[in-house]
Amino acid sequence: VYTRPKNIKFFKRRFPSILHSEWHSPDGESCAILINYGKKDVSFTYDPPDGFRLQNDLAPQFSGILNERQALKIHLAQS
């Protein structure tokens, strides 16, 4: 697809800089991966999906600060 230069329109939008995804492997391991792709540290709170809990933790959610351009793996267990 080609857009002629005179037809290019720029716009700004704000999106969270942390992406996340939950994974479950065939061997039974479950985890969440959080990635801060932004250029600033970001505070976050992660709530596991229904049917899962934080592994080795009684807290219902996980909070912290994810540094710029960093990733975090959170181990999950089925509840």
Image (cartoon, rainbow, N blue to C red):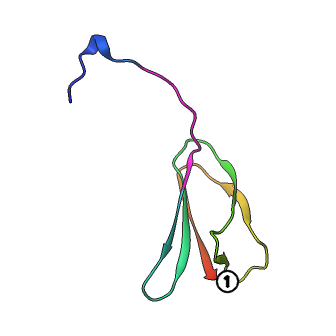
Above/below status of 54 relative to 26: above
Q: Nearer the viewer, residue 72 or 14?
A: 14
72 and 31: which one is in front? Answer: 31
Who's the residue at 75% across and 79% down the image? 57
Q: Which residues are magenta?
A: 10-19
Q: Residue at x 30, y 14 (%)?
A: 7
Q: Does residue 24 appear to the left or right of 40 in the view shown?
A: left
Residue at position x 56%, y 41% in the image: 39
What amino acid type should be assigned to the residue bearing mark 1? Ser
Tell me, yes or no, whether the highlighted magenta stretch contains residue 66. Answer: no
Query: Which residue lies under the disc numbered 1?
Result: 79
| Above-or-below relation of 12 to 60 | above
| Image quadrant where one finds the N terminus | top left
- Name the side, left or right, on which 18 lies relative to 46: left
Chief secondary structure of the magenta portion: loop
Label 1: few (<14), some (14–19) or many (≥20) C-alpha neighbours in 10 Å: few
